[in-house]
Image (cartoon, helix red, strand yellow):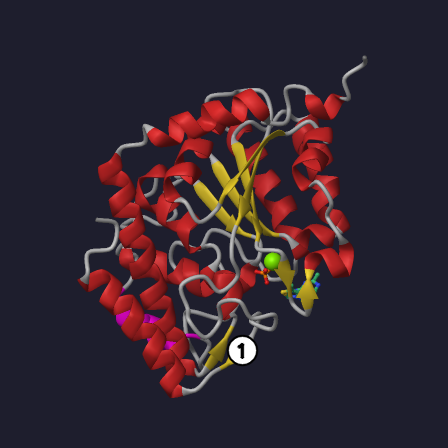
């Protein structure tokens, strides 16, 4: 029987998947604890910023936090004292409405004081609702028009490679964002240029602005689709910091293709009033709701999350 190309080397399934799981098991347990704690700290800082505003993109902010905790918790080569360091790794948060998660991670890494987050999306702030590289130290790319981050990340990865840099470009897409044709034009081009220094993620939280992704434009087997575009693809639990780390390491160990890590996530994760809600994309909430969400996160930290 002839194998379809999707079953071949591009897509991690079966035995390879098991291997990835075994790798995840041997991830340093101390690091796992640190990432879990960092994730809770990011959620708390973002929730305080939302609380000062009274509304925001809570769902899609919370679902990328575990990934950011791993990336900024030691994977990325960065210098908070020199945000524009030329040899740094880049992050393109293509789903730019998740800016509050990125701002929180950057604040905790020391790019700017955490109190400044409380000006989120207010007049003259450095923290607009969507990412803007000209306003926020550490934000590498201006985003918000979905799909465009795919192209800009490819430009950065290609440019850095042409300049002889060893850096990686990390790209975060939303699952609804994958309805954009630009994502697939980029997928074609990135593999054409063998951009192995591009490691992309889809925050596959199964929801977009106004409903479930499968009802609006079903992505079907997303991993298989990227594999058909000749990317190196993995499909993993986007709420498990150890598995996220293992997948990134596995992506780095191959040098031929761009990488796609499909992260199965939960929209609103860690925020009680946003979890398991269909309309948690952009929300208003009461002071009581946000205070309760903050109290839960504070208690997690006090209780030694990650123990
Ligand atoms: C080109 C473009 N079309 C529409 C929008 C409006 N919009 C903002 S977020 C969003 C939904 C995105 O869903 P998803 O990518 O799944 O991200 P999540 O909300 O789950 O974080 C839409 C349609 C936009 N920002 N850009
Ligand atoms: Mg989504």
Image quadrant of residue 27?
A: top left
Q: Which portion, as a residue range, is magenta?
A: 113-120
Residue at 45% across, 61% down: 269
Q: Secondary structure at mark 1?
A: strand
Looking at the image, residue 190 sits to the left or right of residue 163; the answer is: right
Q: Main secondary structure of the magenta part?
A: helix
Magenta stretch: residue 106 in it?
Answer: no
Taking the image as shown, residue 264 lies to the left or right of residue 45, namely: right
Position of residue 302 measured from the top left corner of the image (x, y, whole percent): 18, 63
- Do we see residue 282 in this rendering? yes
Q: Quadrant of residue 110?
A: bottom left
Whether residue 106 is visible: no
Q: Quadrant of the N terminus?
A: top right
* 299, above or below 192, in the image: below
| Number of callouts | 1
- For disc 1, the neighbor class at 10 Å (few under 14, some 14 to 19, many from 20) is some
- Which percent across, then down, holds residue 229? 72, 31
Quickly name the residue at label 1: 283
For image coordinates 75% across by 41% down, the residue present is 185
Q: Is residue 172 above or below residue 10?
A: below
Observer-nearest of 230 and 32: 32
């Amino acid at each position: 029987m002839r194998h379809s190309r999707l079953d071949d080397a591009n897509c991690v399934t079966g035995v390879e998947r098991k291997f990835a799981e075994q790798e995840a098991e041997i991830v340093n347990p101390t690091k796992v604890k640190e990432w879990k704690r960092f994730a809770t700290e990011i959620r708390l800082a973002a929730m305080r910023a939302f609380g000062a505003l009274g509304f925001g993109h809570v769902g899609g902010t919370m679902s990328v936090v575990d990934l950011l905790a791993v990336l900024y918790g030691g994977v990325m080569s960065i210098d908070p004292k020199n945000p524009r360091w030329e040899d740094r790794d880049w992050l393109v948060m293509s789903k730019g409405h998740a800016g509050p998660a990125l701002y929180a991670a950057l604040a905790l890494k020391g790019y700017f004081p955490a109190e400044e987050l409380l000006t989120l999306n207010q007049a003259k702030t450095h923290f607009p609702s969507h990412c803007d590289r000209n306003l926020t130290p550490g934000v590498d790319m201006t985003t918000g028009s979905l799909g465009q981050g795919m192209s800009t990340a490819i430009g950065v990865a290609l440019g850095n490679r042409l300049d002889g840099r060893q850096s990686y470009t990390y790209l975060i897409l939303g699952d609804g964002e994958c309805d954009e044709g630009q994502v697939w034009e980029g997928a074609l081009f990135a593999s054409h240029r063998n951009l192995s220094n591009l490691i992309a993620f889809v925050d596959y939280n199964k929801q977009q602005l106004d409903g479930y992704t499968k009802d609006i434009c079903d992505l079907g087997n997303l991993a298989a689709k990227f594999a058909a575009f000749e990317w190196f693809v993995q499909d993993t639990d986007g709420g498990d910091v150890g598995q996220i780390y293992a997948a990134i390491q596995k992506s780095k160990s191959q040098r031929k293709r761009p990488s796609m890590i499909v992260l199965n996530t939960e929209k609103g994760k860690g925020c009680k009033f946003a979890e398991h809600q269909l309309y948690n994309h952009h929300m208003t909430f009461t002071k009581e709701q946000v205070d309760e969400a903050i109290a839960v996160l504070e208690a997690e930290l006090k209780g030694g999350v990650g123990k």
